[in-house]
Image (tube, helix red, strand yellow):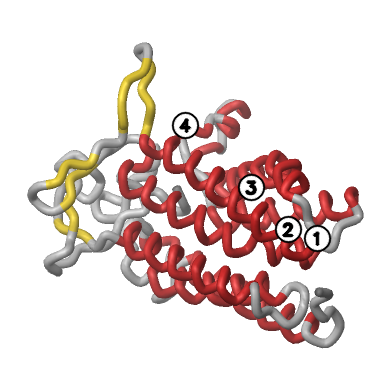
């Protein structure tokens, strides 16, 4: 799930994100449903399954990778609650601030905590998780940049699974297209059932590619923090590219031809480049 999740192809009204409401169909043959199965009368959603898979795959691969530079697997496992908590708080806080007027102003405060009724923001989650990692590293007296390098490829891996969750639940959808690989959601979806870009698939594939590239580069890094810096730059570029195919942004949230995510991507690229330049001069890798 990501920001904005509001209707853009229809009337422009705001409300519950599509990610919470709809399934869809891919092409003309394959059905996509938000609910994977029922267990004891409880609906188990694809988004939750894929989010869980994202965290498990992410932390498992990070724990294996971290041992190469003296960080135990247990350290990564202990970090998990910090990362998950920081990511959720950051992602939700960003969303609430961004959509305060449309969704939360004048409503009971508890609406802020109703995650099932509205969205999260990836970049906010990244900031929250980063702050949580900084605090954890200082408390445990760990090398922050070694820790960040170990986690970075796994962030891309987990994000790839997360975007597939978006596909299965109908959020973060694309703009109209007549390309042969276009997808169609049901007629009551905010797209109105027209053919749209499968942007969730685009970003998922690019994130999986980024994961393999960073995992390979990790073995060849020259200074601490290099992989994290590369991740910031590379992800921001791919996200800015994918954003050009998004269709769920109301026009009032677009500054010219640039979406909010693209604007933040520019800032993140600059931050990544500055980080790479500074760390390359002072923190060589310790074998």
Mark 3 = which residue? 87
Displayed quadrant of residue 243: bottom left
Residue in the foreground of this view, choosing between 112 and 155: 155
Cα distance in 3D space between marks 1 and 4: 39 Å
In the structure shown, which secondary structural element does the residue marked by tag 2 occupy?
Answer: helix
Mark 2 = which residue? 67
Q: Nearer the viewer, mark 2 or mark 4?
A: 2
Mark 4 = which residue? 116
Marks 1 and 3: CB-CB under 8 Å?
A: no
Q: Report if residue 136 is visible in the image.
A: yes
Q: Nearer the viewer, mark 1 or mark 3?
A: 1
Above or below, 140 against 22 in this view is below
For label 3, count other residues whose C-alpha is less than 10 Å away and answer few (under 14), some (14-19) or many (20+). Answer: many
Hey, which residue is sitting farthest top in the picture?
40
Displayed quadrant of residue 113: top right
Residue in the foreground of this view, choosing between 129 and 68: 68
Cα distance in 3D space between marks 3 and 2: 24 Å
For label 2, count other residues whose C-alpha is less than 10 Å away and answer few (under 14), some (14-19) or many (20+). Answer: some
Cα distance in 3D space between marks 4 and 3: 16 Å
Cα distance in 3D space between marks 2 and 1: 5 Å
- Which quadrant of the rendered structure holds the C terminus? bottom right
User: Residue at (38%, 44%) from the top-left corner?
Assistant: 14
Displayed quadrant of residue 179: bottom left
Looking at the image, is mark 3 or mark 2 earlier in the sequence? 2
Above or below, 117 against 238 in this view is above
In the structure shown, which secondary structural element does the residue marked by tag 3 occupy?
Answer: helix
């Amino acid at each position: 799930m990501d920001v904005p999740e509001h209707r853009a192809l229809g009337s422009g009204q705001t409300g519950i994100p599509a990610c919470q409401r709809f399934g869809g169909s891919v092409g003309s043959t394959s059905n996509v449903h938000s609910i994977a199965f029922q267990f004891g009368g409880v609906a188990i959603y694809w988004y939750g399954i894929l989010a869980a898979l994202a965290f498990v795959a992410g932390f498992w691969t990070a724990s294996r990778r971290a041992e190469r530079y003296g960080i135990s697997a247990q350290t990564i496992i202990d970090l998990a609650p910090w990362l998950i908590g920081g990511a959720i708080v950051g992602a939700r806080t960003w969303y609430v601030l961004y959509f305060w007027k449309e969704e939360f102003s004048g409503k009971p405060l508890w609406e802020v905590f109703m995650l099932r009724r509205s969205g999260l923001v990836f970049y906010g989650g990244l900031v929250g998780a980063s702050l949580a990692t900084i605090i954890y590293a200082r408390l445990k007296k760990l090398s922050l940049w070694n820790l960040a390098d170990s986690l970075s490829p796994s962030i891309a891996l987990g994000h790839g699974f997360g975007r597939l969750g978006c596909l299965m639940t109908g959020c973060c959808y694309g703009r109209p297209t007549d390309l042969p690989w276009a997808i169609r959601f049901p007629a009551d979806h905010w797209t109105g059932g027209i053919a749209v870009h499968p942007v969730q698939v685009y970003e998922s594939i690019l994130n999986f590619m980024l994961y393999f590239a960073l995992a390979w580069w990790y073995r060849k890094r020259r200074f601490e923090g290099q992989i994290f810096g590369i991740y910031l730059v590379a992800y921001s570029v791919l996200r800015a590219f994918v954003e050009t195919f998004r269709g769920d942004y109301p026009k009032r949230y677009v500054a010219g031809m640039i979406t909010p995510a693209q604007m933040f991507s520019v800032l993140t690229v600059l931050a990544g480049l500055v980080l790479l330049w500074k760390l390359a001069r002072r923190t060589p890798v310790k074998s």
